[in-house]
Image (cartoon, grey):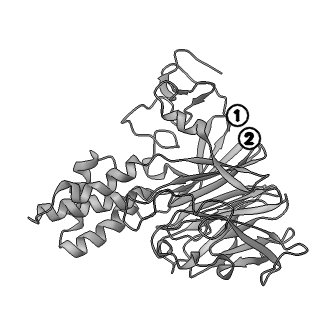
């Protein structure tokens, strides 16, 4: 997506070999200046999880200070085992991060923020309850739908609809899960979302949802150890491509990709009349086992722990990322042990983080003829200094 808008001198511009990206949120704020999406900068609501476009408006689903939430999550575990107070733990975090992670103690949930391409302005249009994030956003039938997320499965999760008149309505609610996470529009008229069940919304009624898959359709993936962790949404992403829904699920052995559609002649059908099969992973026979070169069970050693899929110009792509937070948590555990006088070396606890940072992330494209995902070599070349995009300052007013 490219956005064209007036910018002044000293606004930040990212220049690549054949494209230019202009910074549109607080464009004159540079390195180590308070940023965010709204005017003046709001760092606590600047983590963008999903975008949805409707007319001249782009709706941004955010997670409020997710970095602080993860620090608190790990800190409670580490402090409980070590006897350190959370205040002392945060003092250590401030020291090693130069205070760049704000401590979130405000009783407020995440925002939905609207950006208007004509005016160039950002506006908060929804604020959730405490510890409530917005993980999903998709436009369908002239309405925009958002899905909530919380690390606490006892919190009611919901789907929120923004209608054409600007009104918000909760159209679906459930308990016992942590997210209304992945979403896509399938064949132009159906919108599935998933949390170890794939749901399809009625075209006519926002309150009518039916299952097209559940955990029984995905082998051992629902029982993978990663699904009991904070990252444990069994489906991370959905995309529609050539009549199928493609779904990614995280795994300790490298993320997997499934595809599904209403069962056709000769295809096996699940309880809901759909056919699902694994197309990238350990059990499919089409691709090499998994999309990970290195399996692991320790933080920072896994490749391609989590993956996403998206369609662009009629072709399907997948990309990955690793369990970097796990490596950072292991580093803090080691630092605490050293502070308490334990006989540990820096390499004992920093190697996980180092290994994670050494793993370059990768992008693949699906070959529709063979059903095989092939790595995009041009992406790897972006790490070369001669072709790497760079930030510069705009020297004149531009439209």
The residue wearing badge 1 is 118
Q: How many marks?
A: 2
In this rendering, position of residue 80 left or right of residue 183: left
Tell me whether circle 2 and circle 1 mark residues in contact (CB < 8 Å): yes
Q: x%, y% of residue 83?
A: 17, 73
Q: x%, y% of residue 261?
A: 81, 68
| Mark 1 neighbour density, 10 Å: few (under 14) some (14–19) many (20 or more) | few
Outermost bottom residue: 271
Which residue is located at x 54 percent, y 33 percent? 23
Front residue of this view, candidates 65 and 129: 65
Query: Which secondary structure, mark 1?
Result: loop
Q: Which of the numbered marks, if any, corresponds to residue 56?
A: 2
In the rendered view, tell whether residue 280 sits above or below residue 77.
above
Q: Is residue 86 visible?
A: yes
Front residue of this view, candidates 209 and 314: 314
Front residue of this view, candidates 39 and 152: 152
Quadrant in which the N terminus appears: top right
């Amino acid at each position: 997506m490219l956005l064209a808008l007036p910018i002044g001198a000293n606004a930040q511009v990212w220049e690549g070999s054949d494209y230019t990206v202009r910074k549109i949120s607080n464009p004159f704020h540079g390195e180590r200046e308070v940023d965010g999406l709204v005017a003046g900068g709001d760092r606590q609501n600047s983590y963008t999880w999903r975008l949805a476009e409707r007319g001249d408006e782009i709706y941004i689903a955010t997670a409020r200070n997710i970095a602080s939430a993860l620090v608190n999550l790990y800190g409670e575990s580490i402090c409980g085992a070590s006897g350190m107070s959370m205040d002392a733990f945060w003092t250590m975090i401030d020291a090693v991060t130069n205070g760049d992670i704000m401590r979130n103690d405000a009783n407020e949930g995440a925002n939905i923020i609207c950006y208007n391409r004509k005016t160039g302005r950002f506006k908060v249009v929804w604020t959730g309850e405490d510890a409530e994030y917005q993980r999903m956003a998709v436009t369908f039938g002239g309405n925009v739908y958002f899905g909530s997320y919380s690390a606490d499965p006892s919190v009611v999760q919901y789907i929120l609809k923004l209608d054409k008149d600007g009104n918000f309505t909760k159209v679906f609610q459930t308990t016992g899960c942590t997210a209304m996470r992945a979403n896509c529009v399938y064949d132009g008229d159906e919108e599935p979302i998933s949390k170890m069940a794939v749901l399809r919304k009625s075209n006519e009624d926002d309150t009518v949802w039916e299952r097209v898959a559940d955990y029984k359709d995905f082998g051992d993936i629902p029982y993978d150890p990663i699904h009991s962790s904070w990252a444990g949404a069994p489906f991370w992403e959905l995309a529609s491509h050539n009549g199928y829904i493609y779904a990614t699920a995280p795994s300790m052995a490298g993320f997997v990709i499934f595809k599904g559609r209403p069962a056709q002649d000769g295809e096996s059908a699940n309880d809901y009349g759909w056919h699902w099969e694994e197309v990238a992973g350990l059990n499919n026979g089409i691709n090499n086992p998994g999309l990970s070169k290195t399996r692991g069970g320790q933080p920072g050693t896994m490749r391609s722990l989590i993956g996403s899929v998206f369609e662009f110009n009629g072709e399907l792509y997948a990309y990955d990322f690793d369990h970097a937070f796990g490596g950072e948590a292991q580093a803090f555990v080691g630092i605490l042990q050293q502070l308490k006088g334990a006989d540990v070396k820096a390499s004992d606890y920093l190697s996980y983080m180092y290994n994670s940072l050494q793993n370059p992330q990768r992008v693949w494209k699906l070959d529709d003829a063979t059903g095989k995902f092939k790595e995009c070599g041009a992406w790897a070349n972006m790490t070369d200094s001669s072709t790497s995009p760079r930030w510069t300052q705009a020297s004149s007013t531009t439209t």
